């Protein structure tokens, strides 16, 4: 059984938590018909903007809107500062881990993580072995998925070190909230997110190869308009003031990458790539790829171009590798992890497999290389047939799975058809890691499971998003003055 969920506005049913006072008052005083109208206006805005996604495997191939919830999620500044410290520690360790496994492999030699889990990993790229990256940056943009279970505890659910998506929703959600609810927004001191593009551009330029000019040229490499995240690719290119290019727009000559323009060839120094490793260079990886740039890895190896994120970072996304992150962090930083992992059973280990098979109806089982909520068993929500199907999969290929307890994910007030109701959420903050340091954007993307009781927040599985506010609480003197004013008004 899943324990009672912690509600971020009202805890376990007690009085309103700090930071949510104004939102709670707003929800009580706003007529339902106004909320319905604003919800409809938000949908119209997103349709007008064109922010859609496609679901792979959808027979109709229909472009969809990710549902937007008009009730913001609130995180106080003290809570966020603790999270930011842990996020920066984790991304620093992930970067050191990737640099190490593609060079000396000290973490494997020390027995911190099994050798086969790294070097036989489907995402490990032996072609990257020994490559000296500009500034030793492997992960420049990370999306770390977090879940909350009580007032003080956040867990890392998974790491996204390849091409983390969703940041366009973080930015557009804030824009829509400011347009629809200016009065509510003005009553809070909300940390801005709109400077993310400037921070990202600064991060990318800081990673330019040493052969680049003083003002490095950055471009965004997309698979093209048929990709499910194409809107985000074009959105980010526009925000960065960078060219959005496909593979055919670039070519390599003498180990230098050039971009075709109407004014002639232009050298490219940094590529923010949104193409998977397998397709990025047909001369190195899949020869049938028409999405990538022939010779790109040769230019990369020569140190004449930077790829963000680096090729081969998918090893860090593996859920079995994730289970070793506390030890990996300790190995590289000498300190315990600030943000904890969800307790995890590695089904490749006989004792763990036995426990998982004996407790399948209670656990969440995931494929080690899965994503998007696919290939997953949520035991308490599954029927007997699905449980037995997973039992057979586990017995046949235990190394492909991990299992975790079914956490009581926190809930946030969410506006659904029935009115305002609690729904489970997670959080994907975005961490930027460049030659000029590591920094986090305050907030991130909150994903919400719109179906009552559901723990699956992924958009491909029917989840939505909401704006995430990191709010500064009133300083003690200000709060005292406000209270005095209220007392004076009451006497009058």
Image (cartoon, rainbow, N blue to C red):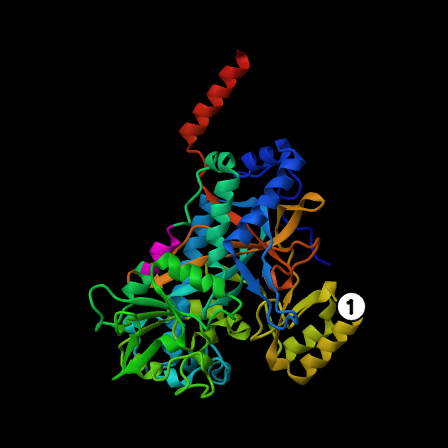
**Is 200 a magenta residue?**
yes
Above or below 234: residue 450:
above
Question: In the rendering, at what x and y percent does residue 322 appear?
Answer: 51, 70
Q: Nearer the viewer, residue 475 or 335?
A: 475
Question: In the rendering, at what x and y percent does residue 475 appear?
Answer: 41, 33
Q: Quadrant of residue 400?
A: bottom right
- Residue at x 68%, y 73% (from the top left corner): 356
Left or right? Give the position of 332 relative to 169: left
Pick the quarter of the image with the N terminus. bottom right
Question: In the rendering, at what x and y percent does residue 238 appear?
Answer: 38, 59
Q: Which residues are magenta?
A: 195-201
Residue 160 visible in rendering: yes
Please tell me whether mark 1 sits on a helix, a strand or a loop. Answer: loop
- Where does label 1 land, which residue? 383
Left or right? Give the position of 312 relative to 32: left
Q: Nearer the viewer, residue 35 or 7?
A: 35
Above or below 382: residue 39:
above
Left or right? Give the position of 359 relative to 15: right
Above or below 293: residue 83:
above
Q: Nearer the viewer, residue 474 or 272?
A: 272
């Amino acid at each position: 059984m899943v324990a009672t969920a912690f509600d971020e506005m009202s805890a376990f049913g007690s009085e309103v938590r700090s930071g949510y006072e104004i939102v709670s008052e707003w929800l009580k005083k706003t007529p339902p018909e106004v909320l319905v109208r604003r919800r409809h206006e938000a949908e119209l805005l997103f349709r007008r903007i064109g922010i859609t996604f496609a679901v792979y495997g959808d027979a109709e191939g229909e472009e969809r809107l990710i549902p937007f919830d008009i009730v913001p999620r609130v995180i106080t500044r003290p809570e966020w500062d603790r999270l930011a410290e842990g996020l920066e520690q984790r991304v620093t360790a992930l970067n050191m881990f990737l640099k190490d496994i593609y060079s000396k492999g000290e973490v494997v030699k020390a027995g911190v993580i099994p050798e086969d889990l790294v070097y036989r990993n489907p995402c490990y790229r032996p072609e990257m072995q020994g490559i000296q990256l500009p500034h030793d940056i492997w992960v420049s943009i990370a999306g770390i998925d977090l879940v909350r279970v009580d007032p003080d505890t956040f867990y890392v659910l998974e790491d996204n070190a390849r091409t983390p998506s969703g940041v366009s929703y973080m930015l557009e959600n804030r824009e829509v909230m400011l347009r629809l609810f200016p009065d509510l927004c003005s009553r809070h001191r909300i940390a801005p997110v709109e400077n993310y593009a400037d921070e990202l551009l600064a991060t990318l330029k800081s990673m330019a190869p040493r052969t680049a000019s003083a003002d490095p040229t950055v471009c965004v490499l997309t698979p093209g308009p048929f990709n499910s995240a194409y809107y985000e690719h074009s959105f980010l290119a526009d925000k960065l003031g960078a060219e959005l290019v496909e593979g055919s727009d670039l070519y390599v000559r003498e180990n230098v990458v050039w971009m075709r323009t109407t004014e002639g060839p232009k050298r490219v120094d940094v590529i923010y790539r949104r193409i998977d490793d397998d397709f990025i260079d047909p001369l190195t990886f899949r020869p049938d790829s028409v999405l990538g740039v022939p010779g790109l890895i040769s230019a990369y190896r020569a140190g004449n171009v930077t790829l963000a994120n680096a090729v081969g970072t998918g090893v860090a996304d593996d859920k079995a590798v994730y289970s070793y992150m506390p030890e990996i962090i300790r190995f590289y930083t000498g300190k315990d992890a600030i943000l904890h992992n969800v307790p995890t059973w590695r089904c490749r280990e006989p004792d763990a497999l036995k426990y998982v098979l004996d407790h399948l109806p209670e656990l969440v089982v995931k494929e080690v290389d899965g994503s998007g909520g696919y290939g997953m068993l949520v035991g308490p929500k599954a029927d007997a047939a699905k449980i037995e199907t997973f039992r057979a999969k586990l017995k046949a290929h235990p190394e492909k799975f991990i299992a975790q307890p079914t956490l009581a994910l926190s809930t946030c007030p969410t506006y659904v058809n029935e009115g305002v109701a609690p729904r489970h959420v997670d959080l994907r903050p975005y961490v930027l890691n460049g030659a000029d340091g590591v920094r986090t954007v305050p907030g991130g993307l909150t994903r919400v499971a719109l179906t009552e009781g559901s723990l699956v927040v992924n958009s491909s599985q029917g989840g939505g998003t909401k704006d995430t506010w990191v709010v500064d609480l009133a300083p003690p003197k200000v709060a005292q003055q406000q209270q005095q004013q209220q007392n004076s008004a009451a006497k009058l």
